[in-house]
């Protein structure tokens, strides 16, 4: 591919040069010499709790939190919809705050408390938000649903904690739970099936019960 | 069971379970992350390895050389599959381009290699080491530029050109005329779950956990592609993370997973990356459409003409944008024409309501424009041109047609009488406010569908069919159907779907799934009822199944008794035949009402209110059916306001190939949505007396939005999507 191939090559050379510098300044030289194949993964041990259970994994440093949980711990509730932080299907709750788990590396979460959809409730013992999604049909294909629910739980907590959003009118007063606030804060969680209207109903019901 | 006479009274009519708003039986799994989608399968005995797809970076040409050595040498790499080493591959019956390209490249991001490695990170990293030399050839990528080279192309079950009466003469002499050309862009399904498959060989038998709407098509085409007997292929797809037509067909990731697994003798899992999905798979093709309407001053349509141009790869089909125009409105003189030009963009194919969705985006703006020319209310103009018969063949009646009721009921509920006819008159703060209406229309198709039902000694009925649930609610309506037929509550029914080991169903597409697949379950349950009655010594004719018991005369026995001596299994397939299609036209109808606000300074468009009134036969589960409709309405808002695959007409690809560039509606874009179903049963459609509804919801929505924008601003945009740049320089004075 003419034109852009040149760009690709330039970028690759640039990256190779940049990483060599980083190695020279930041890493012990023995680590570099020991690696016979430059594609050898750099492994790192990381410990965190997931849904209250302690885990220690020895993991390729390139592994995202999402892939660590899905592919290594086999908790596949969180979904990979884009791997870019564009869709929200991978949303988890880390130390009480929601996060796109595809946009963060597992090694950055040493010591963190992570909650996934599996940690909120189980069939037969649903979290109130999960039950409200069932009651209001707040899903269709279900693929974005774990992310919607994790986000939904965290959003209500954010509002209760007084964290303002783009649509909060008065930044000095406590944020109140309105459909506008919910819609704004949930807009990082895409539902292509278009269950939005029902998700708002589900969240509004849970918010009302909490209030 | 052959369905060839109108349905009489049958056990479904009891409506003890069917027809009631019911929570989805798969809901507790979907909401807890315990529903297994394709990429979620994990076998602790046989750990899968990871495949990463490499896509071509030219739109057309040949691969001259592929440098694989560096990638092969990378740590963890187990195999690299290319056309060179994959062995002979055929092409699926329903694929236009090959799913593994090379040396010929037919479209941008056509798969040309799969790198298989121990971990995902290793496969991805090695894939970036592959260098490809291409010899590019010139392609055609601009529909407008090649439009006039388009050839007549017939549609599924319809000719390319239709003429009734004297269209040209009637149009030329019509006192009121509209002649306008519109465009709709290429659109992406952008379902949340990317195409994903895990393939595993056991000897010469292949199992693929995948995400596919049509199990039997996928099984057939995978076997055909690999050159193995279809009995050796098993597809498993119990949960599908959205399809919208994009997963009707076998796609590259399934073929590559199978090839990777064959090469490595390990299970291989492959998901398309999001950026690859848009150019690697299929999309809704762009159209250019010309509408001509002629009418008398009282608003009677005398001439109606619709022409559509679209493009596709060789072997691809045209977008059937004209098809609703043959049936929706009366008018003695009619014509439609479909032209297909060759384009070298990725393959265009079905996306939610193919044909009608883009067709109504255009026709229903034209109707709004014509109503204005006539000085008629757009609701009244449509009502005036209603027809109860096929306008081309008046001897064919619509089995049911309640378009007028949808329009009238919707107008009353929405407060249509408050609409100010003259555009640009209503202000609410910084918003210019307008209302729009459009008719919704989608044909009802019935497709042969089979199911197996089993009664056990606990009185539990298990249904097995290869039908899929793509978010449509199939699990629940199939469970409701079996429960109603066997006189059980829904919790006594187990539903198993999406496995090629089960009887072949209609699959999910074209809004034919709900009615067809439940009819297949109905047929199997009729057989099961007969077998149960026999086992219990009843005359099956007068056995009544209710409350978990079977009753005849004074004798009543628990249903479970029949299964005590061993499971009773029954299987059947519903086949739709007879002269129904000659005698009746089966369609679904609706009316969409939309209110928008347009920012007087920025031309930002916000949808404020939406209502759909639908007439689609018996509604099997009003809760999930309503969800289907609001989902369609949401996608219709996307099509109206934001969705457009931007074509690079020099390089031949869709530029905005991720979810940041290809915008779809998010929470903040969608207001509360109101849906009303008319109380209707259609005995011509099936024993269920139901019809499809999943695509009706999108049909006409975009035009209703566009018409509301016109009413708000006085600006008529004929090129979708209605982005604010198309309004800004024409906005009314902000003062």
Image: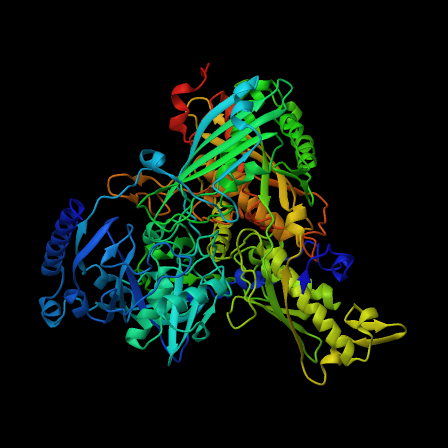
Q: Position of residue B440 (x, y in %)?
A: 59, 38
Q: Where B70 falls versus B144 (above or below)? A: below
Model colouring = rainbow
| Observer-nearest of A60 and B422 | B422
The quadrant in which the N terminus of chain B is found is: bottom right
* Residue B43 to residue A64: above or below: below
| Viewer can see residue B588 | yes
Residue drawn where x is 12% and y is 60% of the image: A23
Residue B206 occupies which quadrant of the picture?
A: bottom left
Is residue B271 visible in the rendered structure shown here? Answer: no
Q: Residue B191, image x and y in percent?
A: 44, 52
Which picture quadrant has residue B256?
Answer: bottom left
- Total numbered labels: 0
Which residue is at the far bottom?
B565
Residue A15 screen position, x and y as percent: 15, 53
Q: Point out residue B346 in the picture as x, y percentages from the top left corner.
A: 34, 49
Q: Is residue A115 above or below residue B171?
A: below
Asked whether, in this view, residue B535 is left or right of residue B60, the answer is right
Residue B516, placed above or below residue B42: above
Give the residue at x 49% y 29%.
Answer: B291
Task: Please tell me which residue lies in front, A169 or B99.
Answer: B99
Give the residue displayed 70% in from the left and 71% down from the top.
B527
Residue B490 relative to residue B261: left or right: right
């Amino acid at each position: 591919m003419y034109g852009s191939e040149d760009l690709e090559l330039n970028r690759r050379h640039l990256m190779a040069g940049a990483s060599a510098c980083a190695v020279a300044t930041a890493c012990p030289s023995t680590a570099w010499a020991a690696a016979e194949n430059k594609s050898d993964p750099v492994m790192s041990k990381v410990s965190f709790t997931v849904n209250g259970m302690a885990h220690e994994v020895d993991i390729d440093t390139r592994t995202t939190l999402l892939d660590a949980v899905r592919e290594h711990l086999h908790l596949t509730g969180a979904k990979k919809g884009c791997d870019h932080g564009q869709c929200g299907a991978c949303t988890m709750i880390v130390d009480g705050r929601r996060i796109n788990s595809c946009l963060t590396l597992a090694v950055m979460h040493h010591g963190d408390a992570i909650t996934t959809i599996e940690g909120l409730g189980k069939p037969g013992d649903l979290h109130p938000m999960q039950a409200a999604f069932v009651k209001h049909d707040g899903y269709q294909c279900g693929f974005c649903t774990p992310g919607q629910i994790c986000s939904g739980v965290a959003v209500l907590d954010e509002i209760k904690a007084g964290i303002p959003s783009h649509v909060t009118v008065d930044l000095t007063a406590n944020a109140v739970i309105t459909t506008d606030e919910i819609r704004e804060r949930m807009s990082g969680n895409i539902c292509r099936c278009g269950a939005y209207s029902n998700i708002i109903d589900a969240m509004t019901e849970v918010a009302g019960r909490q209030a | 069971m052959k369905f060839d006479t109108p349905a009489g009274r049958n056990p479904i009519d009891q409506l003890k379970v069917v027809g009631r708003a019911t929570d989805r039986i798969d809901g507790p799994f979907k909401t807890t992350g315990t529903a297994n989608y394709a990429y979620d399968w994990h076998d602790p005995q046989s750990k899968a390895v990871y495949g990463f797809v490499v896509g071509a970076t030219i739109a057309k040409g040949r691969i001259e050389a592929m440098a694989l050595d560096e990638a092969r040498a990378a740590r963890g790499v187990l195999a690299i599959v290319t056309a060179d080493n994959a062995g002979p591959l055929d092409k699926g019956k329903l694929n236009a381009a090959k799913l593994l390209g090379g040396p010929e490249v037919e479209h941008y991001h056509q798969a040309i290699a799969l790198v298989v490695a121990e971990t995902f990170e290793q496969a991805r990293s090695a894939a970036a080491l592959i260098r490809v030399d291409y010899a590019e050839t010139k392609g055609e990528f601009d529909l407008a530029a090649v439009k006039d080279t388009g050839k007549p192309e017939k549609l599924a079950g319809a000719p390319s050109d239709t003429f009734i009466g004297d269209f040209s003469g009637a149009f030329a002499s019509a006192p009121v005329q509209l002649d306008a050309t519109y465009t709709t862009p290429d659109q992406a399904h952008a379902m949340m779950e990317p195409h994903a498959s895990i393939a595993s060989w056991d000897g010469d038998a292949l199992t693929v956990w995948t995400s596919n709407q049509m199990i039997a098509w996928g099984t057939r085409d995978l076997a055909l592609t690999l050159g193995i007997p279809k009995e050796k292929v098993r597809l498993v797809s119990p949960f599908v993370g959205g399809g919208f037509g994009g997963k009707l067909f076998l796609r590259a990731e399934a073929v590559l997973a199978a090839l990777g697994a064959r090469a490595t003798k390990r299970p291989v899992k492959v998901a398309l990356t999001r950026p690859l999905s848009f150019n690697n798979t299929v999309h809704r093709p762009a159209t250019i459409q010309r509408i001509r309407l002629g009418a008398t001053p009282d608003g009677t349509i005398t001439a109606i003409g619709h022409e559509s141009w679209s493009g596709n790869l060789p072997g691809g089909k045209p977008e059937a944008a004209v098809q609703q125009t043959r049936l929706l409105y009366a008018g003695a003189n009619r014509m439609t024409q479909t032209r297909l030009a060759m384009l070298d963009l990725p393959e265009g194919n079905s996306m939610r309501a193919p044909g009608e969705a883009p067709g109504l985006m255009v026709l229903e703006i034209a109707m709004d424009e014509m109503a204005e020319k006539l000085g008629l209310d757009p609701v009244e103009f449509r009502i005036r041109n209603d027809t109860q018969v096929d306008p081309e063949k008046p001897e064919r009646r619509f089995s049911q047609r309640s378009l007028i009721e949808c329009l009238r009921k919707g107008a009353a509920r929405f407060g249509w009488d408050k609409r100010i006819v003259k555009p640009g008159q209503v202000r609410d703060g910084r918003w210019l406010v307008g209302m729009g209406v459009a008719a919704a229309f989608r044909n009802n198709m019935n497709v042969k569908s089979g199911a197996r039902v089993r009664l056990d000694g606990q009185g539990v009925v298990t249904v097995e069919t290869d039908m899929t649930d793509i978010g449509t609610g199939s699990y629940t309506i199939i469970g409701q159907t079996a429960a109603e037929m066997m006189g059980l509550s829904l919790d006594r029914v187990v539903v198993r779907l999406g496995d090629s080991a089960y009887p072949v169903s209609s699959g999910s597409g074209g809004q034919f799934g709900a009615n067809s697949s439940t009819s297949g379950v109905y047929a199997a349950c009729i057989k099961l009822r007969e077998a149960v009655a026999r086992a219990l010594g009843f005359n099956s004719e007068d056995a009544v199944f209710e409350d978990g018991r079977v009753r005849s005369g004074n004798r009543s026995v628990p249903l479970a008794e029949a299964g005590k001596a061993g499971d009773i299994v029954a299987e059947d397939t519903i086949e739709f035949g007879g002269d129904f299609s000659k005698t009746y036209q089966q369609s679904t109808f609706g009316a969409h009402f939309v209110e928008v606000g347009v920012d007087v300074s920025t031309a930002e468009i916000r949808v404020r209110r939406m209502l759909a009134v639908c007439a689609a036969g018996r509604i099997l589960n009003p809760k999930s059916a309503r969800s289907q409709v609001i989902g369609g309405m949401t996608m219709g808002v996307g099509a109206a306001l934001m969705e457009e695959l931007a074509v690079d007409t020099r390089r031949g690809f869709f530029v905005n190939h991720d979810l940041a560039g290809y915008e779809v509606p998010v929470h903040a874009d969608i207001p509360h949505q109101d849906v009303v179903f008319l109380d209707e049963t259609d005995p011509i459609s099936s024993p269920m007396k139901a019809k499809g509804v999943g695509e009706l919801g999108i049909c006409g929505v975009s035009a209703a939005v566009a018409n509301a924008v016109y009413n708000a601003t006085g600006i008529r945009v004929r090129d979708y999507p209605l982005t604010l740049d198309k309004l800004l320089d024409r906005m009314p004075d902000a003062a």
